[in-house]
Amino acid sequence: MLAFLAILSYGIWWAYTLQKPLPGGGCGKSGWLWNESCLYINEVKPDPALVSPKGLSPVLIGFTKAAGAGPPIFLPMWYRFRYVNVLTGGYSEFSDWTKSPVMSGACCLPCDGVCPFATGSTTCTYNQPVIGIDKTKIKYNPQVQQEKGEFIYMNLHRYVGKIGDKTPPTDAKDEIVGMMIMPRRKYYAYIDVLDNPCKKGCQVPDLCSSNPCDNTKPCP
């Protein structure tokens, strides 16, 4: 139910602020280069005119348990983003990956400083990460049209590793999961609930048998 409400809120926000086709449907005749599910803009070719987001990293701004969003996420997931032109599909270089992976039960999560929630075994039931980027650090405001009438959005890419992976490979084959365009406090955000990598089952890590985390300290 919470997952449904999150997606519904996302659609309502689109309808009343941008007046553009809603992600999830009705986008075919918009003139924008949506993917088939209307969840992100297709990336067609590199656009050297777009500023590179290198040096920036998405952060984890929320992590909860949502009914209907699948099992806990016991595989490490890293995120990065790139700017994309909604009319041409031109895209920028990638940002940096999240500083650490998102994973249920992990002590070190890629929050913006100290996590606003308890880490470790407390998160062993969590399945709904919210990934964001600080509004003050990005080059393009997704709510503001550019000079030629286009919008520049932020496609969010995700790489799912295996238990024990410490970093994503340099040639990581990631996937686009959505767009960080939803205003949430000081961030633009995306709620990653639509494609749980553990929906067919994942091994429960040892971290979920105890809680050795010190939640007063940020990740190293």
Image (spheres, rainbow, N blue to C red):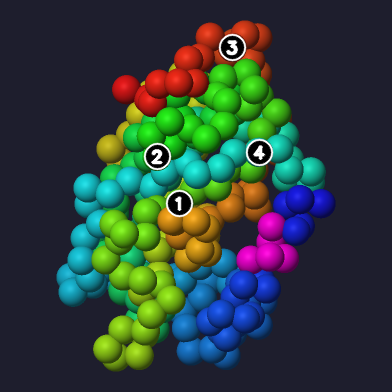
User: Disc number at residue 132?
Assistant: 1
For the residue labelled by badge 3, is the local secondary structure a helix, a strand or a loop?
A: loop
- Residues 138 and 28: in front is 138
User: Badge 2, how many Cα within 10 Å: few under 14, some, many 20+?
Assistant: some
Q: CB under 8 Å between callouts 1 and 3? A: no
User: Which residue position is annotated with label 3?
Assistant: 211
Task: Give residue 149's position: percent from left, percent from top.
Answer: 35, 90
For the residue labelled by badge 4, is the local secondary structure a helix, a strand or a loop?
A: strand
Three-letter code for the amino acid on which mark 1 is drawn: Gly
- Residue furthest out toward the left: 48
Q: Quadrant of the C terminus?
A: top left
Residue 122 image-quadrant placement: top right
Q: CB under 8 Å between callouts 2 and 4? A: no
The reply to whether the magenta stretch includes residue 125 is no
Task: State the predominant SS element of the stretch in magenta.
Answer: helix
For the residue labelled by badge 1, is the local secondary structure a helix, a strand or a loop?
A: strand
Mark 4 / mark 1, whichever is N-terminal? 4
- State the CA–CA distance, disc 4 to disc 1: 15 Å
Residue 34 shown left or right of residue 128 in the figure:
left
- Residues 142 and 27: in front is 142
Q: What range is drawn magenta here?
A: 6-10
- State the CA–CA distance, disc 2 to disc 4: 16 Å
User: Which residue position is annotated with label 4?
Assistant: 64
User: Disc number at residue 112?
Assistant: 2
Q: Residue at x 39, y 53 (%)?
A: 133
- State the CA–CA distance, disc 3 to disc 4: 17 Å
User: Badge 3, how many Cα within 10 Å: few under 14, some, many 20+?
Assistant: some
Three-letter code for the amino acid on which mark 4 is drawn: Thr
Residue 208 image-quadrant placement: top right
Three-letter code for the amino acid on which mark 2 is drawn: Asp
